[in-house]
Image: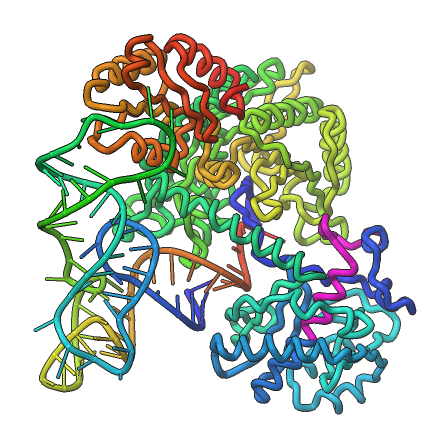
Amino acid sequence: MSIGEYDCSRRPGRFRLYDRVPRAVESTESADMASEAELKAAGEKYVPKDYDPTLYKIRHSLAHVLAQAVTERFPQAKPTIGPPVEFGFYYDFDLDVSPSDEDLGWITDRMRKIIRGKHAFKVREITSVEGKELFKEQPYKLELIEGLVNGQDEYGNSAPLADAPTLTVYQQDTFVDLCRGPHVDSTAALDPKGFKVTQVTGSYWRGDEKNKALKRFHATAWASEADLKAHLARVEEAAKRDHRKVGRELELFMNSPLLGAGFPILLPKGSTVRRILEQFITDYERAAGYQHVYSPDLAKRSLYEVSGHWEHYKDNMFPPMDLGEEELVLRPMNCPHHILIYQSRPRSYRDLPIRIAELGKMYRYERSGVVGGLSRVRCMTLNDAHLFVRPEQITEEFVGVLNLIKKAYADLGITEYSFRLSKRDPKNKVKYVDDDLMWKTSQQKLRDALQQAGVVYREAEDEAAFYGPKVDIEVKDVMGREETLSTIQLDPHLPKQFGLVYKDSDDTEKRPFMIHRGVISTMERMLAYLIELYAGAFPPWLAPVQVAIVPIADRHFDYAKQVAAQLLAKDFRVETDLGDKRMNAKIREFQLQKVPYILVVGDKEMEAGAVAIRLRTEENLGAKPVAEFVALLEKVVGSRALTLNP
RNA sequence: GCUGCUGUAGCUCAGCUGGUAGAGCACCUCCUUGGUAAGGAGGAGGUCAUGGGUUCGAAUCCCAUCAGCAGCUCCA
């Protein structure tokens, strides 16, 4: 739990569990998969957008087939759980050896044989006594039975205790597994070529690193071989766009072991993209009434004691520097600084809303295993702002931020995104500030804002910050997974901590609300996202090099330089290749660097004061007067067009 | 932080069970002045991540550290 904290650094895990089928639904006689509507009706918190009952059953059933093959290969392996996940399934075993590629090949072949055997999935209800006898060799299953009997789900979380819990076992061929199902009727419904065992990794029993380390067999699984191939192609495409790979190839950023993990350096080209982004968003903010400030990265520890961060967020902060007299900490957030700005003089109700913005640099201690690339770092710059508002201004200010986000995303070419109203879980009084009225009214204000902004949104319980509700904007990554970039959070808590007030029209002191918001997210995050969105081929207004000039022979060098100077004078980003390579090689080079416009100049162009325009899409626009190209570029860059020749 | 895998030239990678290092691209020089994705020849470049250990001998085996990747956990 943290205070005043953006959770925009949150990344989705690789695998998303699909298997929280509510008991109420599963115990129906049909043994059919719950529909999405049924899941929602049963209070399921997370129903994936691409939830597919058929795929669920296929994956769940394949998990059993895999378990059979694994236990045949390694009789000492103790099965634990094997749920379907996004794209496939996994199965965890307590296993003392590391399976080799050969083992995985054997297991795959064996699975195919089992599938071709057309074995029925036979379901049977058992009592816990029977279960304990049946699984007496399988300690993890025994623990599961114990938990189920005591009203826990298979992750050891307490689950609402239905009537007498029903235990079921499913059997295919020789393999029996404790499982609530449902499954396909028979392995005949599985495509022997529709799955791929991808890797074996480490995991822990019930996800707790204090527990026994397990071996997790991962597999991706689909209804058909064609679907599997399509998925593998997507995975390949995602790997090609990986911002770490593209970032190195296009010289956008670097890492150095000497500097340390989680501290990327932006190279000149990456820095150019960032500078453009910063200018872009601060211009929009200025127009929207924000005031930009600068504040220091170090502060006395006591600042964060007042804010409450020290108590709640200490583990994510770098340890203080002890100077004897005082202790200084690197800031993990900018909110306290902006609060001090609010407090720098008395505030009247006429002053509000006050919108303080900063491209604030923050330092967070992330555990060594999680940092990487630009998307999870230890030093980051947030496109941060804090709005200090009167209660009746909350809705309007949220609308303002929502519109700002829509505008920014449109320019950035981010088209697939969705809004989520993140609410508290009303049943969980411990996790959230216990103030029913505050939650009710503030959640309604956010709902009003979403409606006024005219956006489609969904509501999600148990996703709020502990002090207040928020609106999260989720974008899709290359694999279609959702990731939160922008967020708007309502916070009554920090104003209380710092005792913020304004003088109202009736001459009484009132407490303002604070809104934390990040539009661009952190610069690092957004850069990573955009690199992957465009596979490095940025739209011209963002491209680090917009124009490359390729002279055909030495005698065209002066003219090339002349053209470059003209473009530079117009504030365009130009690179000229005066090397002695052949023009074909130069063109290839610039194209691989994803430079949007390549201008070839030779005798004809020199004569005519023209440039031959080649787009990175390989389209050739032919020779045009320089002025005409400048006009094209001005139009494209000025309008932040996403195409090169609109 | 935990588990597993990995670390050889700027990049991508070879280097079998230990016998003191290789390719392609990039770079440099020379030749070539070529019209829309790689012109030719030659050259230079490595304390095999770092530090210990085993051994007559270590890129190769062992340990530690650092870094990368995947997963877990975290990011509430």
Considering depth in this image, is A589 or A288 the residue closer to the camera? A589
**Residue drawn where x is 71% and y is 76% of the image:** A115
Residue A43, relative to residue A149: is it above or below? above
Residue A548, horizontal then vertical, whole percent: 34, 25
Relative height, residue A318 to residue A413 (above, below): below
> In the displayed structure, does residue A406 sit left or right of residue A223?
left
A166, A608: nearer the viewer? A608
Q: Please tell me whether residue A61 belongs to the stretch shown in magenta.
A: yes
- Judged left or right of residue A133, residue A194 is left
Quick check: can you spot residue A552?
yes
| Colouring scheme applied when the structure was drawn | rainbow
Please give the name of the residue rendered at 54% of the width and 40% of the height, measured from the top-left corner: A6
Picture residue at 67% right of the left edge, 72% below the top: A63
Image quadrant containing the C terminus of chain A = top right
Question: x%, y% of residue B45?
Answer: 13, 52
Range covered by the magenta-colored residues: A40-64
